[in-house]
Image (spheres, rainbow, N blue to C red):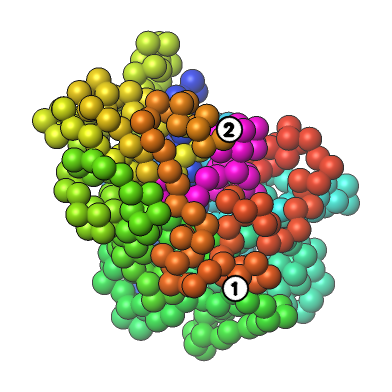
Amino acid sequence: MISQFETGTAETEGAFDPNADRLREECGVFGIFGHSDAAALTALGLHALQHRGQEAAGIVSFDGTRFHSERRLGLVGDAFSEVSVIEKLKGTQAIGHVRYSTTGETILRNVQPLFAELHGGGFAVAHNGNLTNGLTLRRNLVRDGAIYQSTSDTEVLLHLVARSRKPHFIERFVEAIRQIEGAYAFVGITNKKLIGARDPLGIRPLVLGELDGCPILTSETCALDIIGAKFVREVENGEVIVISEGGIESHKPFPPVAERPCIFEYIYFARPDSIVKGQSIYERRKRMGAQLSLEAPANADVIVPVPDSGVPAALGFSQASGIPFELGIIRNHYVGRTFIEPTQKVRELGVRLKHSANRSVVEGKSIVLVDDSIVRGTTSLKIVKMMREAGAKEVHFRISSPPITHPDYYGIDTPDREKLLAATHTLEEMRQFVGADSLAFLSVEGLYRAMGHERRDPVRPQFTDHCFTGDYPTSLTDVVGESAKQRISLLAEAG
């Protein structure tokens, strides 16, 4: 099997993200089998998943003889908008990936899908999530002679599949994923198959769709909507989907357990128009805001969302409280994610690159400022300050999720615990830090009520919610006994 790979642009140095104090989801995946426009449809699907990763994008296709790859740094529209690029990606099956790296620089060798020539043919794979034993497996594999081409934990899967002695590819793939821990949604292609797999707890999402009779695997339903595809079902937790010319096969290689999807998909990561488990993300976020208004009411003139993530919750808060909803902050959608080598003064003004106060709405008013989360708190204090400078009389800050007190190891970019504001400050100290007149978070039980449950089951929690509770659902092999520096060397480039 002959592989041809294209190189991308050089990595950007000295980049500064003026909106860095946010939760970041690392990746989105897309795959389609048997369609004559496979690469173009994959590019469109990645456009819809752009919110899940903005630093790099890649597509690998197969034309019956060759695998073709285009992997680029930057946005999907910058990399895959030209006909000449799509024409290079020949074939009727393709997979794609959008990526956000947790820390450090994004480099081309880590951009997915990753590809390897294995016994029996080529294999390309894209991954959303993080392997919590990826570093341990990597060390063992390198000790046994494996040669790595990236620092991504995803490459572990390629090596495990390559070393398996099982006779059939799917058996080798299953043997490989049985050795890994953590959160993952994989899509991969061989010369005959499109493969999808979801971790045993279903922490990371994956759905099955169909267009013109051609099966699709992707992270969210919004990627199906953009190409006019039909939603078929969610890939179940612990399920392996195998798609070939013979049809669709489902494998269940793990003992059955209750699923625990990531609660942050509902709070923040999924696009508002996506459907997860039959539930509208938009409506659930509104319910979180409504529940927040019951738990932490405020005497105010106007409800102001922090755009864009705070908008649905602010609408819910407004409708439940009867306080008018207004756009007191205007977001500039045309600012890039990075600002090259800024001066200190520009760093201090960074929040204004994306958010500007709408003075006519907030001046002389008592406002309720609604956002989805507080991480370090640095952006929150700048936004509160911006509201006061625009003439707000009072600023009551309301957060539509519980306080984030623990870091994530499953594919969300969070700081170490000592850098999480809620882990190191009391509620009053947090209020003083951000400069609000009052501050309140949605309770954990309130979050579960907003999700349609009477309460959180402490024995078998319905969601993966460790950032709020410290209840990690899997083993954290790489974390135990490892220094932060050693962990970051691999996990920083995971995706």
Residue 128 in magenta?
no
Q: Secondary structure at mark 2?
A: loop
Above-or-below relation of 109 to 282: above
Q: Residue at x 63, y 60 (%)?
A: 183
| Residue at the disc numbered 1 | 259
Q: Residue at x 31, y 74 (%)?
A: 229
Name, please, the residue furthest toward the right.
144
Query: Which badge, 1 or 2, is on the more N-terminal residue?
Result: 1
The one nearer the camera, 423 or 84, is 423
Q: Which residues are magenta?
A: 399-425
Residue 354 is situated, as x and y percent measured from the top left of the image, at 29, 31
| The N terminus, quarter of image | bottom right
The one nearer the camera, 241 or 403, is 403
Q: Which mark is residue 315?
A: none
- The answer to the question of whether label 1 and label 2 lie on touching residues, with beta carbons closer than 8 A, is no
Residue type, numbered disc 2: His
Instruction: Tell me which secondary structure the magenta stretch mostly adopts.
Output: loop
Residue 298: quadrant of the picture: top left
Residue type, numbered disc 1: Glu
Residue 259 is situated, as x and y percent measured from the top left of the image, at 59, 73
Q: Residue at x 73, y 35 (%)?
A: 484
